[in-house]
Amino acid sequence: MQIVEQVGQERISRQLLTLIKHQRVGNAYILSGPLGSGTMSLALNFAAALNCKHPGPDHSPCGTCDSCVKIKRNSHPNIHFIFPSPAGKNPKDDDPFAALSEQEFGMVQDAMERLSEDPYQGIEVESATTILISMIRKLRKDLMFSAGEEGWQVVILYRGEMLNDSSSNALLKILEEPPGKTVFLILADKYNTLLPTIRSRCQNIPVNPPSVEEITQWLVDCYGVDRETAAYYAHFSHGDIRRVKEFLSSDMKAESEELKQFWRYLMSGNMAALTQWVEDSHKQFKKDKEAVRRKLRQILFWLRDAQLIREGGSPVHLIHSGFVEELTRFVAYFPAIDYLKIIRETERVIELTGKNVYFPALIGHLCLSLTEELAHARSGT
């Protein structure tokens, strides 16, 4: 079984358990995959399998022994977490937390609490931009003088791409002479963001995001979501389980109604309503950037669905499967839309929302481009 929630990744799970079965566990692995793909879940379940007191026939963890329970609670002395943290004032070389203010230390504790509740949240500490060398030096001491339990020492290094040159070199020294029965699990967004010297000491295990079908089935089985809605969430998530969980706690029905209203404004050329929509989106963007990006992705998927219908595709492949009637009318009303052009423009806008671009101008330009394209498509010019 798995001691923490894990969506998909069955092949990698079997691969890691096989290493235990054949006693071929190496010193260091890089689990390279985007945030929300499940690298932390894989690492925690592997750590549990290595230290479980009553493993199954396939060496999977039992989930109930004291070792498994401690790992679920992030309290096992054999499991060491390395992660980006604030530097604080006058940081010390061997204690990454000594220089933190009470507020900063509280943020670290909150991040660890979130991890114990949901491994897909990772260890995200506000204002943390790098993995400090002091954290690596503390790890070295902890491994040398560990009074942990019998079993494997497991180092889970989160956001390996945030290692700086100093902390990378300090880590490399440990990897060059690793303590016995110790395994490093370096979680990185992209494999190439790590120094070549570190990559050369580790075995890379690429982690792809779970598929739409895996996410859909998980939502149906674990959350009781109806299959149509589950597939809708899965498509929108791009394999990021964190995003799926945001959908579960958001009002997607209201967002869907807003999407239909947005297209009514465009189709009717109601510029006053569109201007208000831009202003409202700007206010929302200041509070919740991801919600606005989700709104823009809905626009993008509407266009892709409309293109699919125009090309004679089956409605079962639509992302907005609940909008078949509206999409069919849209395609009939605007038969000459250049979908490739406006899909690319919408993708560009979504990408730019993550950069330092003035949002009202960006989103206003998108509305203008869409309005002009609809006018051309309707007139046939």
Image: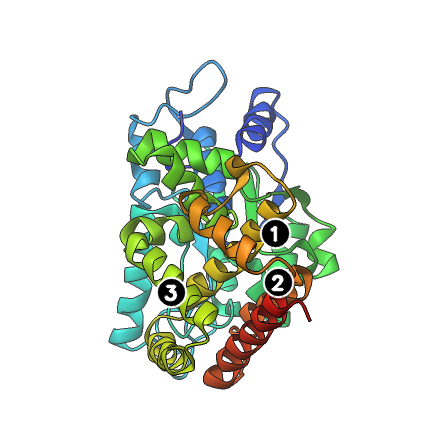
For label 1, the residue is 307
- Seen from the viewer's position, the closer of residues 40 and 304 is 304
Task: Report the label total.
Answer: 3
Q: Earlier in the sequence, mark 2 or mark 3?
A: 3
Which structural element holds mark 2?
helix
For label 3, the residue is 291
Seen at 53% across and 83% down, the residue is 356
User: Which quadrant of the figure has residue 44?
Assistant: top left
- The kind of residue on which mark 2 rests is Ile
Task: Spot the residue most to the top.
Answer: 57
Q: Earlier in the sequence, mark 1 or mark 2?
A: 1
Does 251 sit left or right of 196 as displayed?
A: left
Seen at 49% across and 39% down, the residue is 42
Which quadrant holds the N terminus? top left
> How dense is the environment of label 1, judged by Cα within 10 Å: few (below 14), some, or many (20 and up)?
many
Mark 1 and mark 2: Cα distance apart in space: 10 Å
Is 214 drawn above or below residue 311 in the view shown? above
Q: Position of residue 282 (x, y in %)?
A: 38, 80
Which quadrant holds the C terminus? bottom right
- The kind of residue on which mark 1 rests is Gln
Seen at 49% across and 81% down, the residue is 364
Seen at 51% across and 63% down, the residue is 137
Q: Are marks 1 and 2 in contact (CB under 8 Å)?
A: yes
Answer yes or no: is residue 359 visible: yes
- The kind of residue on which mark 3 rests is Ala
> How dense is the environment of label 3, judged by Cα within 10 Å: few (below 14), some, or many (20 and up)?
some
Mark 1 and mark 3: Cα distance apart in space: 25 Å
Which numbered dot is residue 343? Answer: 2
